[in-house]
Structures are given as structure tokens and as C-alpha cells.
Image: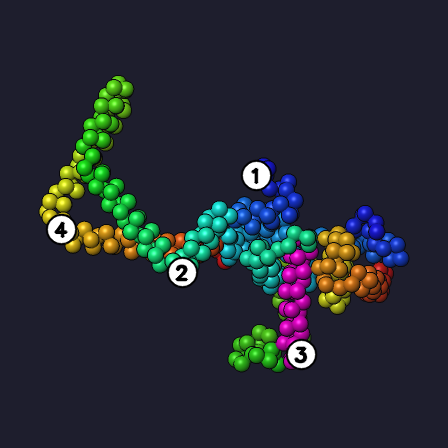
Amino acid sequence: MTTDLATWTDQDVVAHAQRGSELAFRELIRRYQRPIFSLVYRMVRDRELAEDLAQETFIKVLNHIDSYRPEHKFSSWIFKIANNAAIDHLRRKELDTLSLEGAPDAVTIQRQEATALQVGSRGESPLEELEARELGSQIENAIAQLRPEYRACIILRHVEGRPYEEIAETLGLPLGTVKTYIHRARAELRDILDPLRE
Amino acid sequence: MSDDLRSPTPSDTDSDLDNRLKTLARVPVPARFEDRVLARVRIPLPAWLRRTSKGVRAMLSGPRGWMILGGFSLATAAAWSVTVAAGVHFGGYLSEGARHAVSEAGVPLWREVGAAGQFQIEVIRSSVLDLFEAMRVSPAVFAMTYGAVAVVSAAGLRILTAEPSRVRDTNHVAH
């Protein structure tokens, strides 16, 4: 076997990583950093937060590389952990933003202001401008309005090009449910985008 | 199912929506993301080292673990003692042999290097002998030194067999 890991299959690279090769760890990060970051970023729409969640995903996966079972696809495993991290965050955020006064755990005035629901317009920082440019198209905004489960299905299908079976395995859903979610998500996207066509 | 992974299901055909979906691309990753991740990841030790470490751990945690640990540390200390004693005792012969070999080779540069090396060996040898002479190495001093080497060897073995993974040095990685 050559040391050019870029040509190896995921399974071979993981086996090499399990034997303690730092090069294999690097290769896994290189292969999946962009897809994982894209998925998480589109789910949470916050670049800094997406990086944190993507990092946590890789750390969780790579620190438990010994528990990976080769009968499953590595991509399904890592996407599943990334998706769960994003969904967990969105659920926590949903609880936090139920109050206009700020997060329930906000005990200081600064923390209450930081977590309070923003209703007015505000000046954009360079980071926010970058986010607006990256995710500012009509289709991106329409995807942002979907339920998180639909959003994950659409991103995995249309950005990552994953087959339905793998999306089902990744999201822990029956195959029929995945197809239904994608069908409904597309219908919702049409409903959102059609009025914008004129 | 269709082989084209990006194609919609037949019932979902909508060229305008599909065209828009095709514009979706992966977004770029923040700079040095890979380094930041690796800095926080525990990379397992190489398999042969883990196997050895596991085997030794199993031996040490067995009923005769303390005996094995004690035997290992005493043997290590004995090995060090023999090595140092041999070095001190035969240092002169070794350096003379090396000098002879170098002079036989007849290479001027090597002769100079050999002469410098021989001088250094001689200095170290006489220093150690002087030290022994000055200390008048007693059985007690020898036993203490021997014991200290044995304890350090035992502690080293315990540390080596206790930690099965390594974490990269993170000092140079900006967060």
C-alpha cells in the first residue's frame, strides 16, 4: 500500500487511523471538513458556531475511531454526528429564544442583551456580511425556512449528493420517510420561491 | 434508484427548482480548521506499541505484577551499573582501539576527529574515576544509587504502560 492516502477508500484510511497514523487522521479531516462544515453551517447559519459544532463533530468521531464498525459507511457515521450536533443546538436555541427577554439561563444584563431576540435592523459586522453573501441567495434563504429535518434531507441530497439509503441511515429514519421529507421540502421550497420569480 | 445522485425523484421534476438547487455549493472551511481539530484529538499509539503496552499492563496487573515490576527494575538498574562500570573500566582500551583504527585508516580528517574524541573519552573516564576516588564509593552509596535507578525504571515502566494514546502538542496552534 502506498502512503498517498488521497487514493485510499474511507475504510482503509480509517483502519490506518485506528493503527495510530496521524496522516490518516489528517486525511479524514481533509476529506470531510468541507461537507461537514457546509452541512452544519447551513443548518445553524452562523459561521463561528458552525465551526465550533464541526470541530466537536470531528473530535467526537476521531476520538472514538476505534468504535467505528466497517459494515457502516464512514460518511454516514460522521454526517449523523454532525447533524445531531446541529439539531441539538437548534433545539436548545429554540428554547432560548422563546423569551424576548433573553435566554432562560441569562442572569446578567449583558447576557440577557446578548441572547434577547433581535427585532430591529442592526449594522452588519464583516463576519455577518460574509455570511450574508454566502447564504444570502433566495434558495439559501428558502432552505433556512424549512424544518431542520427537511433542511438536513435537502442539503444531504442536493449539496452532498448522498443516496436516499445513506440519508436514511444518517438521519436514522425509514427510507420512505426520507423520500416523503424530500418531496415535502421541495414543495415548500416551491411555495417560498414561486412568489419571488416575478 | 437513479445513479445520478443529484437528480430528483421522477415525481419531483421541477427544472426551475432543480436549477436553483444546483447552485448550492459547499462553503469554504475556515483557515487552519484541520490544525485546530487535530490539536484536540487523541491519536492512538501505533498498534505494536499498544499491543506491547497492553501485554505488559496485563502482566503487571496479574497476581505476580509486583514481582515482575521489581524484577524488571532491579534488572534495569543492574544493566545500567554494568554498562557504567564497563565504560569506566574499559574506556581506555576502547579509546585506544578507536585511535588505532583511525590511524590505520589513514584519513587525516578522521585522525583529527579521532584524536579529539579520544581526548574527550579520556577526560570523562578520569573524571569518573576521580569522582569514585573522591567519593570512596561505599556499598551504601552504591546501594542507594542502584535503588534510585531501580525506582526510576519501575516508575518509567508504569508510566509507559498506563497511557494508551497521545495528544499532539497544541502550543503552536492558535485557537
Q: Residue at x 27, y 49 (%)?
A: B77
Query: Residue B67 at what x, y percent from top left?
Result: 34, 56
Label 1 sits on residue? A3
Which SS class for mark 1? loop
Give the chain of mark 3.
Answer: A
- The reply to whether the magenta stretch includes residue A73 is no
Specify the label residue B63 is tagged with: 2
Query: Residue B9 at what x, y percent from top left?
Result: 85, 55
Give how far apart the Cα atoms at labels 4 and 2 are: 36 Å
Label 3 sits on residue? A98
Q: Amino acid at mark 3?
A: Leu
Are dots 4 and 1 in contact, CB under 8 Å? no
Looking at the rendering, which quadrant does residue A3 occupy?
A: top right
Establish whether labels 4 and 1 are both on one chain. no
Give how far apart the Cα atoms at labels 4 and 3 are: 80 Å
- Marks 2, 1: nearer the viewer: 2
Specify the label residue B138 is tagged with: 4
